[in-house]
Amino acid sequence: MPALLRRKFFARSVHEVAPELIGATLLFNSAGGVIVEVEAYHQTDAAAHSFNGRTVRNAVMFGPPGYAYIYRSYGIHWCLNFVCEPEGIASAVLVRALAPTHGLAAMRRRRGVADERLLCSGPGRLCEALGISDKQYGLALDQPPFQIFARGVAADVAIGPRIGITKAVDHPWRYGLKDSRFVSKPFRA
DNA sequence: TGCCCGATTAACT
DNA sequence: GTTAATCGGGCAA
């Protein structure tokens, strides 16, 4: 069994951590799958929620690494981030898509769809599939109900610009598992 | 207090 | 391809 990722793993540059998460396995209450798409957000990056300083919503980003930053998107969806960097850098990795491997029945029930491809292919979708909401805000990523396992073998990582943002749109800080059919949107060749 | 808008999704044409 | 749904954060007044 691959190693459980501990806080130390996240206490590095978000630009190192993000690509290393591709191929890792994220479980929440025994449901989840292989991480196939993430995006990096750094405090010095105008698209980051921490860019304009600490607020109630983003407070956990300003704390120590290895915790969950969860926010409401468009008043409808929840999105899950892993806080990274040494404490105070206020940066995080947005988990955007999983290839489902564990707890398929529970995820299908929560999502209300049968198609495996539509279970976790998007930040809002994967939170709904895993049953993640603001109740998990600030939880440690190396403690139950979270379990995050390092990838077993090297991954072929695709890189591209981030999705759905209007600021700092040109930074190539989106990472994906090359040719995975579970990414939320294909990577340009 | 009021207003604008978003790290999205599903259901349209 | 376009658009409605839906609401809290952030900032101006």
Image (spheres, coloured by chain):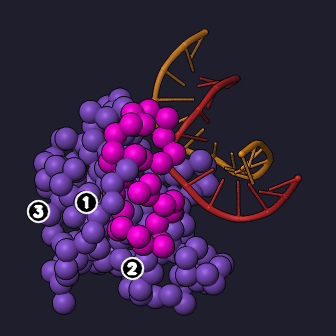
Chain colours: A purple, B red, C orange
Residue type pointed to by label 2 = Gly
Q: Position of residue A63 (x, y in %)?
A: 22, 48
- Which residue has dot 1 on it? A19
- Same-chain check, marks 2 and 1: yes
Looking at the rendering, the stretch of residues picked out in magenta corresponds to A161-189
- Same-chain check, marks 1 and 3: yes
Camera-near label (1 vs 3) is 1
Q: CA distance from mark 3 to mark 2?
A: 22 Å
Q: Quick check: C1 left or right of A154? A: right
Q: Position of residue C7 (x, y in %)?
A: 63, 47
Judge whether residue A165 is colored magenta: yes
Judge whether residue A180 is colored magenta: yes
Front residue of A139 and A92: A92
Residue lying at 66% horizontally and 78% vertically, measured from the top left: A112
Which chain hosts label 3?
A
- Which residue has dot 3 on it? A8
